[in-house]
Image (spheres, rainbow, N blue to C red):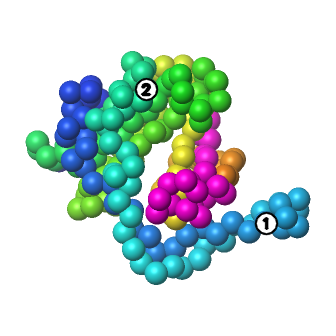
Amino acid sequence: MTEIREVDKTYFPLYDEVSQNVEIKSEYIVKRINNGLGGFVIEEKSVDYRVKDLGKYERAMEFEKQFDISNWRFYMAFDGETPIGAMTVAGPTKGLDLLQGRNDACILWDIRVADNYKHMGVGQRMFDLGVKNAKSDGYKMMMIECQNNNVTACNFYKKQGALLDKMDMHAYDSEPGCEGEVQFIWYLKLQ
């Protein structure tokens, strides 16, 4: 049986052991209508299969080098002593631009489940604990970022009741290997 628990920064080496591979079989393609003035259409399109390792972009061991993490919460899932899942929920933090200065919102910064444990409810259980604690911390909104090629994550957030409210077609243009990906920002009401 897996155990989900809140952890502190001493667990970061174990956190970073959890793979963050995304299987990409399809992407959500964003099309502008009338150069965007007529709105947007989002369609799922099959693409050549590939696996993208998001872990190379997101290392828990680097969090403190970039941010004050004193009001962040960290969660991990374990199968016995083996780390199989990890998640970070970030509260208002200087330099964390996604929150746009809001003090009543948090961000689901990172969620990952080891390849052999996907589709077994591990991510759901971590997410549920993160939402429960975000509510008890008084947050009214949880913001969630993902990419248009992470269809599994998009569908998961939709299933949780999150709404896709923002898209940035150029958010990753300066990230090697990510050019052309679209940033999706989801909002989940907590209260």
Judge whether 91 appears above or below 181 on screen.
above
**Within the image, what quadrant is residue 51 found in?**
bottom left
Q: Main secondary structure of the magenta part?
A: loop
**Magenta span includes 172:** yes
Task: Calculate the distance from the C-alpha at mark 2 to the C-alpha at mark 1.
Answer: 35 Å
Horizontal relation, residue 48 to residue 167: left or right: left
Q: Is residue 21 left or right of residue 107?
A: left
Q: Residue at x 62, y 41 (%)?
A: 187
Q: Position of residue 26 (x, y in %)?
A: 51, 73
- Name the residue carrying label 2: 67
Task: Give how far across and how far down residue 92 sits, in percent.
Answer: 53, 23
Query: Where residue 100 appears, x then y in whole percent?
Result: 65, 30
Magenta span includes 152? no
Q: Is residue 123 visible?
A: no
Q: Is residue 22 above or below residue 105?
A: below
Secondary structure state at the residue bearing disc 2: loop
Could you say where residue 160 lies in the image, as x and y percent from the top left?
53, 48
* Residue 140 position (above or below residue 122): above
Q: Nearer the viewer, mark 2 or mark 1?
A: 2
**Amino acid at the residue labelled 1:** Arg
User: Circles 2 and 1: CB distance less than 8 Å?
Assistant: no
Q: What's drawn in magenta, residue-wise?
A: 169-189
Local crowd size for mark 2, using a 10 Å CA cut-off: few (<14), some (14–19), many (≥20): few
Residue assigned mark 1? 32
- The amino acid on which the numbered mark 2 sits, given as a three-letter code, is Phe
Q: Residue at x 60, y 20 (%)?
A: 103
Q: Is residue 96 visible?
A: yes
As helix, strand or loop, the secondary structure at mark 1 comes to strand
Q: Residue at x 65, y 48 (%)?
A: 163
Vertical relation: 16 (above or below) 42: above
Q: Nearer the viewer, residue 112 or 190?
A: 112
Local packing at callout 1 (Cα closer than 10 Å; few below 14, some 14-19, many 20+) is few
